[in-house]
Amino acid sequence: MTNPYQVADAFIRDFRAAEYAMKRSGFLRQDREGAEPNWDTFAQSLGKPFFDHVVALGIAKTLIGHPPRRLLADMSWSPPNPLPLTNVAQLVVNGVCRVRNSYVHGEKFTGGPEGQWDRDVTLIKEAHAVLAEATSFPGNPLQAR
């Protein structure tokens, strides 16, 4: 098996670079005092053509078809059976960003059901592939910077 920590660290490096570029390109959350990237607005700027592009490439089959769940304050995972992602905002926010959050906040590579490590690696690889496509997608506003 691929070293999961090397795969995850490469993803986090590129995620960090994308957030830096987003903030300096004006993709900022308006409801915060501090400078935080606005992933929703960034996803919307990519639009349906980007989602269709990712689907056509087949680089995020697990991320889209069996997306990661969210850990709630009561320590339960929600939703119990997530529906497939159907649009670019879900792909970026509920896919790429959620995978990043799960890894950074310690919820990846912790054991769990048989095969969970393999799923974690798959989700991280696919989220990384989507992020790479997003930052190089034609017409992407980050390319101007």
Image (cartoon, helix red, strand yellow):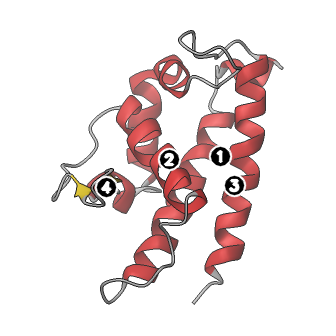
Say which quadrant the C terminus sits in: top right
Badge 1, how many Cα within 10 Å: few under 14, some, many 20+? Answer: some
Q: CA distance from mark 1 to mark 2?
A: 11 Å
Q: Is residue 13 left or right of residue 115?
A: right
Q: CA distance from mark 4 to mark 1?
A: 22 Å
- Name the quadrant containing residue 93: top left
Residue bearing mark 2: 96
Mark 1: secondary structure: helix
Residue bearing mark 4: 69
Residue 97 or 143: which is nearer the viewer? 97
Determine contact: label 4, label 1, CB under 8 Å: no
Residue bearing mark 3: 12
Q: Is residue 11 left or right of residue 29?
A: right
Q: CA distance from mark 2 to mark 4?
A: 12 Å
Lower sequence index among marks 2 and 4: 4
Which is more foreground, mark 1 or mark 3? 3
Above or below: residue 3 compared with residue 91: below
